[in-house]
Image (cartoon, grey):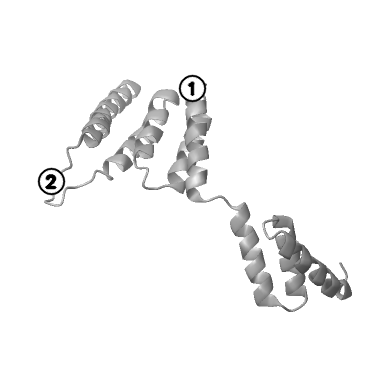
Amino acid sequence: LAAEDYPLAYKSLKTAYKADSTNTKICLYLGKSAIKCEEYQKGIKILNRGLNMIIPSDSTLFNYYFYLVDGYRETENGTEELKYLQLAYKSNPNFRVALYKIASVYDWRLKNKTEALNYYRQFMLTLPKKKSGDTDTSEYTATYYNVAEMRIKELLTEMKMADRKSVV
């Protein structure tokens, strides 16, 4: 649009926005027109509203990522499974077990012992403490954390043995 066309577009788009404020394209063009007509705060407000409508919440993203992980795990596509586990963890850092699952993918699917060890160690750092300072011994922690601790020891042993074989 030419600069002189924005006031008419702004007026028309305000009418369209009143009829349908959930249309993200109307938000985009109304926000742009408002800014071009020096209605900066109104334009910013409308553009932010449009953005909020098109950007999914972290919890929505987490659910999509998590179920994609399931699909890729079932099809034994470790690379994609890993990618979506990392995205799920990024969108919900409280999903600590993702670090364990990432380690497992590196360990068993991708056969990358170094990265597996790295993520098992990161997972162990999330071990919750009871208020008294004792380690939490709930079923959740007893299962994942004990397995991770055991696997760290096994990986270190396997990696030392591999190093010895390569020296000989």
- How many other residues sit within 10 Å of disc 1, few (<14), some (14-19) or many (≥20)? few
What amino acid type is highlighted by mark number 1? Glu
Left or right of 16: which side holds 168? left
Quadrant of image for the C terminus: top left
Compared with 140, 4 (above or below) is: below
Under circle 2, the secondary element is loop
Return the x and y of residue 92 as percentages of the image width and height: 42, 47
Q: Which residue lies under the disc numbered 1?
A: 74
Number of numbered discs present? Answer: 2
Cβ–Cβ under 8 Å for marks 1 and 2: no
- Rounded to the nearest whole Å, what is the CA distance between mark 1 and mark 2? 38 Å
Q: Position of residue 81 (x, y in %)?
A: 49, 31
Res 122 quadrant in image: top left
- Look at 31% across and 40% down and name the residue there: 123
Q: Nearer the viewer, residue 155 or 150?
A: 150
Q: Is residue 33 visible?
A: yes
- Nearest the viewer among 111 and 146 is 146
The numbered dot on residue 43 is none
Q: Residue furthest front?
A: 19
Quadrant in the picture for the N terminus:
bottom right
Image x and y of residue 161, in percent: 28, 23
Residue 58: give x, y in percent of width and height: 49, 49
Residue at 74 percent of width and 61 percent of height: 19
Please tell me the numbered disc located at residue 134: 2
State left or right for residue 122 relative to residue 26.
left
| Quarter residue 29 falls in | bottom right
